[in-house]
Amino acid sequence: MTRLRGIAIGLVVPIVFFSIWWVLSERSTSPYFPPLRRTLTAFVDIWFFARFFTDLLPSVGHFLSGLTLGLAAGVVVGTLMGLFPRFNRDVAPMTEFVRAIPTAALVPLGLILFGTGFVMETFLISLAVFFPILVSTTAGVRGVDPVYLEVARSYGLSFSDRLWRVIIPAAAPQILAGCRVAIAFGLAATVIANMVASGSGLGFFIVDAQTSFRLPDMWAGLIMIGLLGYLANTAFVVVEHRLLGWHRGWRGATRAASAA
Amino acid sequence: MGADVPVHGSAQVAQKPLPSGVAPRSKAGLTWWQRVGEPALVVLCVIGAWELLTRTGVLPAKDLPPATVIGAAFIGDIQQSRVWEALGATLTSWAVGLAGSILVGIPAGLLLGSSQLAYRLFQPSLEFVRTIPSIAALPLLILLLGTRGYQLAAAMTFLGAVWPIMIQTMYGVRDVDPTTMDAGRAYGLGPFQLFIRIVLPSAFPYIATGLRLGAVVGLLLSVAASLIAGGTGIGFLIVNASFSGVPELVYARIVLTGIVGLGVTLTLVAIESRLLFWHASRRRTVT
């Protein structure tokens, strides 16, 4: 009941916002701010029909493959860096440096190495995803309560059992916190890669709509990107909930957050 | 921790002894070789391997210039004023946009965090807005601001940085310990005093984290703006080198951008830890 009320209150601002947008833009003659009605018509035409396979699907596909790759690499390397302090110290200067390079600056590098297309975009997205995961996994694995490790050792657990049953689960909340950041970075990288270096995809679509002055289309693209970001985040919250439902600290934290 | 440090409710946490077995990881146990020598050697080995593999043709030298060639391009490049002007343009836009997002984000966050109603109304929408990649607004801003001046990159920086700053500030205000507030009231502090002495200091770690996140995202967007839209920034110079078919210059300028990015991050972390030394025990690091 209180949850429903919370959702209802949360919906007030978006509803008011879109109503005002609708009313103010209805008679808009500015080409930059077309009526919301026209934008929404364009939205349906574009994303449900014309551009679904040519622009929406490739972008989502690249995003998901880059996300998977960057996630896997980040968790593996991050676990190694967390487990072996010496390895951590030796590679940290390099990872810290590459991490500091803004993703956008790496687009020309991707172009030189892979040309345009799927491989280049996946490379760029996975790189953007890799570093937040790497950092949070390293921190998570290093921060595992030593008492857990002692107990696991005294029970004679093998290394792989300790890794899979103690270390990874204990680090999971941190790894997932990194995932949240990674999803945002990955989505931004998808759009940037599309904008600079491709003939299709969402980012390309909005730039193309802008340069050819199809402004309702550009707005429709903007709304689609926003919607994708929201969907990705919602999917993430669902997964996080399933994976971390058992975790006491996490449960307490979310309960405190929802009660507040 | 000095004796003159004001004791806040939270500062007490620092005095609490750590549970046995949780020895703080100090740098003290490491020798100079472990801390600096070996990592430096590893970096040198990687660079050496790069040089060797590209010189012998195992890696295609056309796309992957040898490290020494990149180094030479880097040194040649930084002697020209062009690259400094571009860096200056990117950083100026970044600083202007960041200043704007601080001026808007912190007051808005304080307001949203202080009022229960405002929080309930706006928090879900803010969480939604933060998931939208700001870069998507670039085409619209190109139309509104053009691509020539500093404005585009500054507006992009603002758009990227204002959300983390606002949201972190909001959560920081909400996380103020109610017991501390009660204690403050019991000591007869007025609303203004409560705000200055309790709310702001305890929200500060959150605000600092928001600033750091905002600054990094803002730099990314400032670079992205000039990379995609052209204009005066460093992003444009990287693309330019790429179009002129000089890969070593692309690498050199990416390295330069990385150095700037690293400098920004390190500076912010240093400021943060200097300002928050008294708060370190409660600091939450969000990466």
Image (cartoon, rainbow, N blue to C red):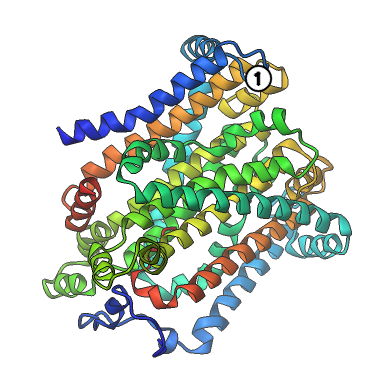
Tally of marks: 1
Q: Quadrant of residue A118?
A: top right
Residue at the (54%, 26%) spot, across then down? A222
Quadrant into which the N terminus of chain B falls: bottom left
Q: Position of residue A55 (x, y in %)?
A: 55, 21
Residue at the (49%, 24%) spot, across then down? A224
Relative to the observer, which residue lies in front, B78 or B67? B78
Dot 1 surroundings within 10 Å: few (below 14), some, or many (20 or more)? some
Relative to the observer, which residue lies in front, A191 or B159? B159
The residue identified by callout 1 is A209
Residue at the (39%, 56%) spot, across then down? A76
Quadrant into which the C terminus of chain B falls: bottom left
Residue B238 shows up from this direction: yes
Q: Position of residue B260 (x, y in %)?
A: 67, 61
Q: Position of residue B100 (x, y in %)?
A: 61, 49
Q: Is residue B137 left or right of residue A4?
A: right
Q: Quadrant of residue A231?
A: top left
